[in-house]
Image (tube, helix red, strand yellow):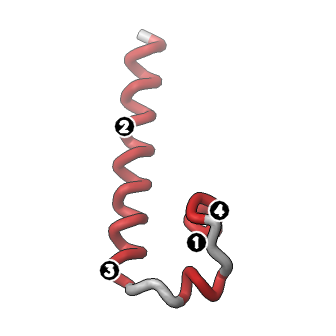
Amino acid sequence: MVQICRDYGWTFQEYQSQPAYFIKAIKEKMVRDQKEQVRVNKKIRG
């Protein structure tokens, strides 16, 4: 939640006012992005 608020510049109240499906989509994207970054880092390190 904190990272989403930072990334989107939201207050807690703004976060709470978002539809659940939207927050879920953001969280899923963050997980995909993190996994991709791990993959890229492994590739770079060889």
Q: Residues within 10 Å of mark 3 (few under 14, many from 20)?
A: few
Instruction: Identify the image quadrant of the N terminus.
Output: bottom right
Q: Viewer-proximal residue, 24 or 43?
A: 24
Q: Which residue is mark 3?
A: 21
Q: Which residue is mark 2?
A: 36
Could you say whether the residue bearing mark 1 is in a helix, strand or loop? loop
Q: CA distance from mark 4 to mark 3?
A: 19 Å
Could you tell me residue 40's position as x and y percent?
A: 40, 25
Q: Which residue is mark 4?
A: 6
Tag 1 near tag 3, CB within 8 Å: no
Q: Residues within 10 Å of mark 2 (few under 14, many from 20)?
A: few
Looking at the picture, which amino acid does disc 2 mark? Glu
In this view, 6 is above or below 1: above
Q: CA distance from mark 4 to mark 2?
A: 21 Å
Could you say whether the residue bearing mark 4 is in a helix, strand or loop? helix
Q: Which residue is mark 1?
A: 1
Could you tell me residue 41's position as x and y percent?
A: 46, 24
Earlier sequence position, callout 2 versus callout 3: 3
Earlier sequence position, callout 4 versus callout 1: 1
Q: Residues within 10 Å of mark 4 (few under 14, many from 20)?
A: few
